[in-house]
Structures are given as C-alpha cells and as structure tokens.
Amino acid sequence: MKLLTFLGIAKYRETIYKWEDRTYPSRFSPLASCAFLEPEEIIVFLTADAEREVFPEFARELPENVRVRPVPVPLGATEAELWQIFDLIAECVEPKEEVAFDITNGLRSFPLLGLLAAAFLRSGLNVHLKAVLYGAFDVGSAMGNGETPMFDLTPMLTLLEWSAAADRFNRTGDSRYLASLIAAQRTVLGKAAQGDPALQNEAGQLGNLAGALTSISQSLQLIRPVGTMKSAEGLAERVEKARPALARSAAAQPFVMLLNSIQDTYNPLGMQDPLDEDDLWESLRKQREIIHWYADREQWVPAVTLAREWVVNWFMTHLKLKEITSSEDRTRIEQVINTEAKQYLAACQRKTDFNSLFLRGIPSLPEALDLWGRLGNVRNDINHAGMRPDPGQPMALIDTIRRNLELLDQLPLEASS
C-alpha cells in the first residue's frame, strides 16, 4: 500500500496523534499515519522550500522499512499549477492499487486538492482507498489534553458521490445511482442494528426505497410505461416508511435534501392500475406525461417510441377495445390505422374528401392519421439506425419529434360520442 501526503514549511509542533485506539507522538502527521496504516511506500508532495527545509528532518524519522519518494510540486499559485499538482498525484498511482492519503500538512490548497484527487482516483481508476487521514491539531489544542485526533475523511467522499448521483438525476431523471447509495446506507444501518429486529426492519425500508427508485428508472429506461406508473405510484409510501432510517443515517442527509425533487419528478407519472378498463383515459394522460418526461430530458428515442404506441392506445380506447396490451388486438388495429392513413394521404394528394371506412366517429381522425404517418417515419428512421438512402440529421429529427409531440397533445382525451 502507498501513503500519499504533503509537506509545507510550517513550524510543526510535537503532539500525540490519536486514531481509533492508537496513539503516536510526532511533529509530523504523516509519520503517525505510517504507524497506523503501515504502508510499504510513502510519497511526499512538497514544494522546493519544503524539500530543502523540512523534508530532511521528516525523512530521518521515518521507519527504515518504509520507502520514501519526494515529488516536487509547484506552489499552486495558478489554476494551471493546481492541475499540474493533480497530474503529479495521479501519475503516482496505478489503477486498482491500494492507497491512503494523509492530507494534514502542506499549503492550504493541498489538503483540499488531496481530498478531491482521492475521490477521483477511487471512482476514475478504481483505486482502493484505505483511508484519508486528517490530523485536527486545532481540535486537540482546544481540548487541552495534548492529543491531536485524526479523522478518516473517507466517508465524506460519499458527499461527492451524492453530488454526482444528484447531477445525473437532475439531468436525466435516472435515480439508479441515488438508489445504490441508499442501498449502501441500508447495509451500514443493518449491520449496526444486529440483534435489534425493530431497527433491522427500519433499515430494511431503505432497501425497499432503493428498490422502488431502481424499478422506476429501469422501467423508464426500457420504455415500460405500465411498470413506470405502478412503481411511481408506490414511491410516496416507501419514502414515508424509510424516513426513520433516513433520519438515523447521517450519510444519507444529502438524499433527504433531494426527496422533494425526486417526488416532484416521479409522482406525476404514478398510477395504481394503468390497465384498469374503467380508467384507460387517465392511463393515456399519464402515458402522455411520460412521453413529455422523456422529451424534457432529451431522451428522444423513448419519447418517439412511446408516442407511436400511445397513438395505438388512443385509437383502441376510442374504439372501446379494453385490452390494450393484447398483441392480437394491437396488430389488427395497427393494420386498420395503416390502411386508413394511406387512404387519407391519397385523398390529400388528390385534394379530395377523405371518407373513413373503419374509424368513423373517432374525433380528430384526420389529425390522428396524419400524426400516425409522421411518427412512423421518424420512429423508423431512428430505430433502424438511419439505414436508409436519406436518413434524417439529428437536429432535424429532434425538431420533428418536438412538432409531433405538439400534434399529439392536440388529440382529445375523451370518450367518443
């Protein structure tokens, strides 16, 4: 294991560093970290002044069995120099290697840079991060017992993971990464609650909440509107049941701050029984909400795919065909719509009146048949990967989808007379 640390030119004072139940007297926090973590090598990032004035004393106090490698770094006086320091840190670490950091010493910017570098190395290079130790000298002075407590800041890196998960959710609506962090907290609370069935059950509610979020995201990703509506409908109950466990988990507080946003995003999509034959119009409204949910997040492929299926559902509901998931009925209705759409297009080209053979009485029929043709063309272009002589260009396809969704919104959601 490698220990990465920093040195500056401050006047380091003797103290007793304490971590967990161990202590180590030294002027240099990284020496205490060496005693606690027992690395094979310590890499010290230091400025030219620190290498000249401090490093010789530091190196003399290192245990003989620990290799030391000084790495000169600039002062970090500019953004370019800060990125240079980051590059030097990254160059010292191999993917999947076990490393630890001591970020106590060095110039003021170095501890923050070390913490951020540790977070990136863990997520970007799959580095196994054993610890990120920080010696709180000021806390020790305030306590007045001659000891300086050392804190492992590794759990605080979870805050950066929450930030990344929140960013992904806000941009795409995908809550799977939030769910994985909630599931991790469920494991932590579950272990702490060993022997207490009530607390274990409480922790289990976090698992149920994580499962609901995962189910919603997977259903949306795979264009499963029925599954999306059912999972979203049950989210509020799972959130309420999970609140006691969330309150007990300090590391889950970033998620608590996101709860309103999460529920505002998903609750409008919820419906208890989307296939209820007596409530298909409301199901159509919810499906249309999902279509716009995709479009708002620029997920154009699922938006146009579901829009095309929505039109089939719309025709079937007007025709009072209750089993909208019946493959036989859907195939039959699609054939009818295709036939009528061709007849409508031909009538438009001839500039003659269009008379429906099979779909009389359906409101806004010409608009619906026109939209059917438009959606079919753009959906085929996309789903067949543009393998045609004149495929649409991305921006043109997006503009077409937007216009089609405006037309879809104009189709009436009410029973035919």
Image: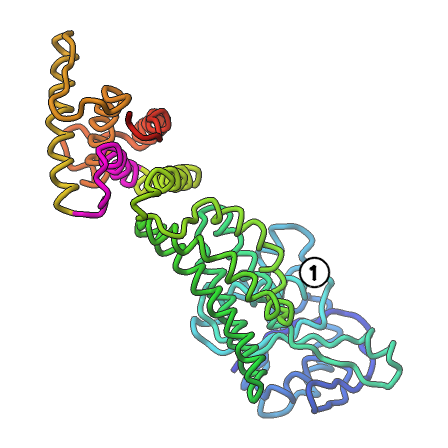
Instruction: Please name the predominant secondary structure of the magenta segment in the image.
Output: helix
Magenta range is 304-326
Residue 116 drawn above or below residue 227: below
Residue beneath disc 1: 109
Q: Is residue 124 left or right of residue 361?
A: right
Residue 305, position as x, y percentages in the image: 27, 40
Q: Looking at the image, which residue is at 37% across and 28% down? A: 409
Q: Quadrant of residue 353?
A: top left
Q: Is residue 4 left or right of residue 335?
A: right
Q: Nearer the viewer, residue 178 or 223?
A: 223
Q: Which of 397 and 267 is in front in this view?
A: 267
Q: In this view, does 100 lie to the left or right of 380?
A: right
Q: Looking at the image, which residue is at 56% across and 89% down? A: 195
- SS for callout 1: helix
The disc labelled 1 sits on which kind of residue? Ser
Magenta region includes residue 55: no
Magenta region includes residue 315: yes
Q: Looking at the image, which residue is at 13% across and 41% down? A: 331
Residue 201, position as x, y percentages in the image: 53, 77
Q: Colour scheme of this structure image?
A: rainbow
Q: Which of 380 and 141 is in front in this view?
A: 380
Quarter of the image with the C terminus in it:
top left
Residue 294, position as x, y percentages in the image: 39, 41
